[in-house]
Amino acid sequence: MLHTLPRDESIRLEDVSKTFVLHLQDGARLPAVTRLSFSVRPGECVALHGSSGAGKSSVLKMIFGNYLTDEGLILVRSGDRVVNVATAEPRDVLALRRQTIGYVSQFLRVIPRVPCLDIVAAAAREDGCEETQALARARDLLARLNLPERLWGLPPATFSGGEQQRVNIARGFAAYRPIMLLDEPTASLDAANSEAVITLIGERKAAGAAIVGVFHDPAIRNRVADRLIAVSRPERSEAA
Ligand SMILES: Nc1ncnc2c1ncn2[C@@H]1O[C@H](COP(=O)(O)OP(=O)(O)OP(=O)(O)O)[C@@H](O)[C@H]1O
Ligand SMILES: [Mg+2]
């Protein structure tokens, strides 16, 4: 089915719902998101807020196509096409991730034994950078995020929580994506590093990216977000 989006929108969720079925608990059903609707314009940052377990990360994972959507539409603009992630084929979801949607997850997941400079440079190469340029971009980002240079050649498995998070952010920002999903990017960062992330987000907004983020700290949320969307925990149910 062909979908359309108003010209000034990059993302639109319409009545999105998701229930987890817990097979290890006799098929108990855990409603996570109920009829959520919002849209995001280019250059705008929309922050999802709500209590722990409310479903914020699940919403980002549905937009990224990591979690299946049970009901509703998730429309994203990709070049001159509009794709409904809720029903997209896996290969279309992969194409979106290569060209359109960037995602900084709540926790870093990487292939073991790859040094962090290479992890970030690999993401920059996805933007079409050749090797030298990709490495330069990776160095620039890691330096802006104050990751000590002595760590650049090491795999991040043994890094502190905040160091891993900065590698995650550098990787997420290494390629320009017109849509960005940020899941608590400043959660384990100190004030100076949070400031660096706020600046990066501001630059992407100025470049026209549409951003959906979760920011634990209300002061940071209010600085980066143009609008807030409340995500609340639906009524929990009973076994199926
Ligand atoms: N893959 C999954 N299988 C089963 N339940 C899940 C799954 N992912 C999330 N949940 C459940 O869905 C609910 C929402 O989780 P989610 O991670 O989206 O919350 P959140 O709002 O991001 O919370 P936090 O602020 O703590 O990060 C939680 O109760 C969680 O246990
Ligand atoms: Mg979360």
Image: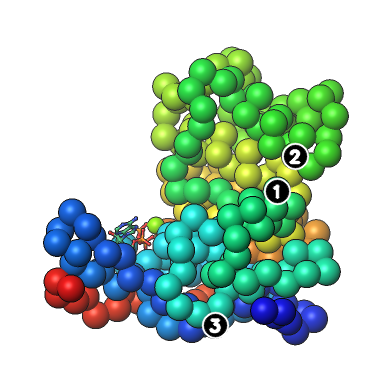
Tell me the residue that label 1 is attached to: 98
Tell me the residue that label 3 is attached to: 14
- Looking at numbered disc 2 in the image, what kind of residue is underneath it? Glu
How far apart are labels 1 and 2 at the CA level?
Answer: 7 Å
- Looking at numbered disc 1 in the image, what kind of residue is underneath it? Arg
Which quarter of the picture shows residue 216?
bottom left
Residue 54 percent across, percent down from the top left:
33, 68
Which quarter of the picture shows residue 63?
bottom right
N-terminal-most mark, 3 or 1: 3
The numbered disc on residue 126 is 2
Element under disc 2: loop
**Residue closer to the observer: 103 or 229:** 103
How many other residues sit within 10 Å of disc 3, few (<14), some (14-19) or many (≥20)?
A: some
Which quarter of the picture shows residue 182?
bottom right
Residue 131 percent across, percent down from the top left:
81, 25
How many other residues sit within 10 Å of disc 2, few (<14), some (14-19) or many (≥20)?
A: some
Taking the spot 21% from the left edge, 75% from the top edge, the residue there is: 236
How far apart are labels 2 and 3 at the CA level?
Answer: 30 Å
Taking the spot 43% from the left edge, 83% from the top edge, the residue there is: 35
- Looking at numbered disc 3 in the image, what kind of residue is underneath it? Glu
In this image, 103 relative to 204: left or right?
left
How far apart are labels 3 and 1 at the CA level?
Answer: 24 Å
In contact (CB < 8 Å): disc 1 and disc 2: yes
Taking the spot 42% from the left edge, 29% from the top edge, the residue there is: 160
Please indicate, yes or no, whether residue 214 appears anywhere in the rendered image. Answer: no
Residue 100 percent across, percent down from the top left:
71, 57
Q: Which quarter of the rendering shows the C terminus?
A: bottom left
The numbered disc on residue 74 is none
Element under disc 1: helix
Q: Which quarter of the rendering shows the N terminus?
A: bottom right
